[in-house]
Image: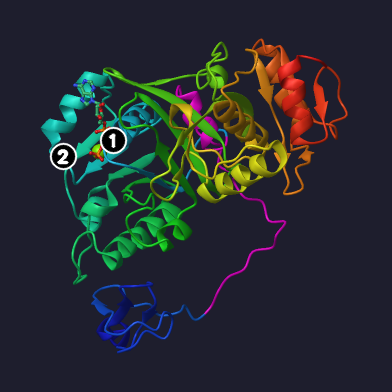
């Protein structure tokens, strides 16, 4: 026993590699001088492991369903007890607000602890009052030591919330708060606690300007679920997206409006990102699929003359390399020259789109802006476009078309590969643009 107690553990501050021996160069990531000593966490492999038969009966924990339906949906249909969830987002996105509201919703089932290293208890309390989420089972603390928090818990809570992982630390670890090794160690202890007690743990994480969680990617691998809260900083609209989920589908989204009294769920967000009536040149509408939900979106393009410097191509909410490719397609198959033109592309409402089904709408918007020709209102473009200029069908076509019709779209321009009815089908981009402008089926 004594031997285990005396042993030291070293952790690589770069990749999290652990060893009982000091190392100059990390054998895993090969960085030099990254070994950090931690106390009280020596890891000795247990001598025996008990396996259970796969047919043994186990108590399957039911998911906790709350009054926050959209949050429950993003989590995969409620909160799985014992799960560890990382919630990441930029500054001021509303992470604390959303989780405080969710904490209060969960407190209807049992105790919930909200630990903030960022704000004092009076500050959190004033937010609680502003949001109207007081609950006598919701406990607030501004302790910054994870071990102290875990030691002070008497009755098993439903959930623990740490705001944020960058501001907490563990006992016995000689590394700065907010450093990679410190954050990693905190998460290790929280995961251990969650799995052994069936308490769910939420961890808030800031993201960098580049859009990554400030800290190692390894944090994403350590937790069960990763949620991103995103949106335009100046607008009140927020999107919560599951990018990893061990207990449910990913790419599921929830849409909120940030108001004075908190985050208001938008239960039917299909049309809020698009202005279907717009008849200005440079606009095109598409329908994208996000998880189980389809959303109508507005793609806007602006092309302007630039004879003085290298032309600019900038996309917001859309991958830049894909914009370059689609610009080349418009030049090649629709006879529009972008040689001396800047190209800007924007997805309205702060959405980030990776669905290939928007290709046709991007091409339509670029063409419309360059030619100063607007498409008839209530026209929707759905299809992926290959380098050969052919329009291809995408996943869940029927769902998109049904949604378009529900929202009052008059015409859907899509691929000839789609076998359903009630749409205008095109083989090539040229064909698609001609059909959209002529109004023929
Ligand atoms: N009194 C208020 N009335 C209206 N809106 C408010 C008020 N106080 C804060 N907000 C809104 O809440 C937002 C901040 O929310 P919140 O603190 O939950 O974000 P956060 O993501 O936790 O930020 P941080 O990264 O700073 O921790 C502000 O951007 C603002 O829009
Ligand atoms: Mg906050």
The answer to whether one can see residue 80 in this image is: no
Which quadrant holds residue 410?
top right
Asked whether disc 2 touches disc 1, contact meaning CB atoms under 8 Å apart, the reply is yes
Which quadrant holds residue 239?
top left
Is residue 134 rendered to the left or right of residue 25?
left
Mark 2: C-beta under 8 Å from nearest atom of ligand 2: yes
Q: Is residue 55 magenta?
A: yes
Dominant secondary structure, magenta: loop
Residue depicted at x 55% and y 21%: 281
Q: Where ligand 2 lies, by quadrant?
A: top left
Question: Which one is nearer the viewer's eye here, 258 or 186?
Answer: 258
Is residue 164 rendered to the left or right of residue 308?
left
Residue depicted at x 62% and y 50%: 58
- Magenta region, residue range: 48-76
Mark 1: C-beta under 8 Å from nearest atom of ligand 2: yes
C-alpha distance separating marks 2 and 1:
10 Å
- On the image, the x and y values in percent for residue 92 come to 26, 35
Residue topped by disc 1: 96
Residue topped by disc 2: 119
- On the image, the x and y values in percent for residue 339 come to 54, 45
């Amino acid at each position: 026993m004594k031997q285990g107690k005396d042993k030291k553990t070293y952790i690589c501050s770069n990749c999290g590699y652990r060893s009982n021996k000091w190392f100059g160069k990390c054998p895993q990531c090969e960085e030099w001088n990254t070994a950090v000593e931690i106390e009280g966490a020596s890891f000795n492999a247990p001598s025996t492991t008990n396996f259970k038969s796969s047919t043994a009966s186990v108590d399957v924990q039911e998911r906790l369903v709350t009054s926050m339906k959209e949050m429950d949906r993003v989590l995969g249909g409620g909160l799985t007890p014992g799960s560890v969830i990382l919630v990441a987002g930029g500054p001021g996105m509303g992470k604390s607000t959303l989780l405080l509201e969710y904490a209060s919703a969960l407190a209807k089932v049992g105790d919930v602890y909200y630990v903030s290293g960022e704000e004092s208890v009076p500050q959190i309390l004033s937010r609680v009052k502003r949001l109207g989420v007081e609950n006598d089972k919701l406990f607030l603390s501004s302790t910054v030591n994870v071990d102290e928090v875990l030691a002070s818990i008497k009755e098993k809570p439903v959930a623990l919330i740490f705001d944020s992982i960058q501001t907490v630390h563990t006992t016995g670890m000689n590394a700065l708060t907010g450093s990679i090794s410190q954050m990693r160690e905190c998460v290790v202890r929280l995961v251990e606690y969650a799995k052994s007690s069936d308490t769910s743990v939420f961890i808030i994480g800031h993201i960098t300007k580049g859009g990554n969680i400030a800290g190692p990617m390894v944090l994403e691998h350590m937790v069960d679920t990763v949620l991103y809260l995103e949106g335009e900083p100046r607008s009140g609209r927020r999107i919560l997206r599951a990018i990893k989920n061990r207990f449910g589908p990913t790419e599921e989204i929830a849409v909120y409006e940030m108001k004075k009294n908190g985050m208001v769920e938008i239960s039917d967000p299909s049309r809020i990102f698009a202005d279907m009536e717009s008849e200005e040149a440079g606009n095109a509408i598409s329908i994208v699929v996000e998880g189980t939900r389809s959303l109508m979106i507005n793609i806007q393009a602006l092309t302007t003359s630039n004879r003085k410097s290298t032309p600019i191509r900038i996309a917001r909410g859309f991958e830049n390399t894909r914009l370059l490719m689609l610009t080349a397609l418009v030049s090649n198959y629709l006879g529009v020259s972008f040689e001396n033109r800047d190209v800007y592309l924007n997805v309205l409402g702060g959405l980030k789109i990776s669905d290939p089904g928007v290709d046709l709408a991007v091409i339509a918007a670029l063409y419309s802006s360059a030619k100063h020709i607007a498409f008839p209102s209530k026209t929707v473009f759905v299809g992926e476009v290959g380098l050969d200029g052919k329009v291809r069908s995408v996943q869940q076509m029927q769902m998109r078309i049904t949604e378009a019709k529900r929202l009052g779209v008059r015409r859907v321009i899509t691929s000839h590969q789609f076998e359903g009815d009630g749409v205008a089908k095109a083989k090539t981009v040229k064909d698609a643009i001609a059909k959209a402008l002529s109004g023929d089926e």
